[in-house]
Image (cartoon, helix red, strand yellow):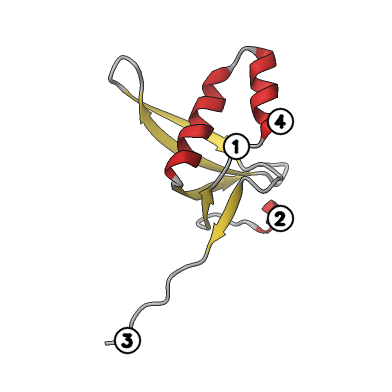
Amino acid sequence: MPDWRRLRVGDKIRIVAVRPYIQEEYGRTGDDFTFRVLKRLADRQTIRVIARIDEFGQPWFDYRFRNDAGEMEDHALAVCDDDSWVFVKPRKRAKH
């Protein structure tokens, strides 16, 4: 399991899954918005860049999407302490 405490601003991660407890938690509170966003990110295997580390050491990434009204919305999510994401290693540049 990747260690979220090692992430730094600028690191890249790929969201690869939505853990079942996430679905249960958001389903219980009636907030399926976050679950739907995480599912979309996992289905698309999108790469996210760590934008900030909060005062508790939790890394956060930003994301943007088009809402039902067709307008762009900006949001942020904290990186979970689970295996729903993987670290994306930087590519080595080819020598010319």
Mark 3 or mark 2: whose residue is earlier in sequence: 2
Q: Amino acid at mark 1?
A: Val
Disc 4: which residue: 21
Q: Secondary structure at mark 4?
A: helix
Disc 2: which residue: 1
Position of 61 compared to 80: left or right? Answer: left
Q: Residue 29: percent from the left, percent from the top?
A: 67, 14
Q: Are marks 3 and 1 in contact (CB under 8 Å)?
A: no
Q: Residue 61: percent from the left, percent from the top?
A: 52, 43
Name the residue located 37 percent from the left edge and 77 percent from the top edge: 93
Q: Residue 68: percent from the left, percent from the top?
A: 34, 16
**Is residue 28 or residue 12 the one in the foreground?**
28
Q: Amino acid at mark 4?
A: Tyr
Disc 3: CA contacts within 10 A as few (<14), some (14-19) or many (>=20): few
The count of marks equals 4
Residue 70 seen in the current view: yes
Q: Secondary structure at mark 3?
A: loop
Q: Residue 30: percent from the left, percent from the top?
A: 62, 12
Q: Are marks 2 and 4 in contact (CB under 8 Å)?
A: no
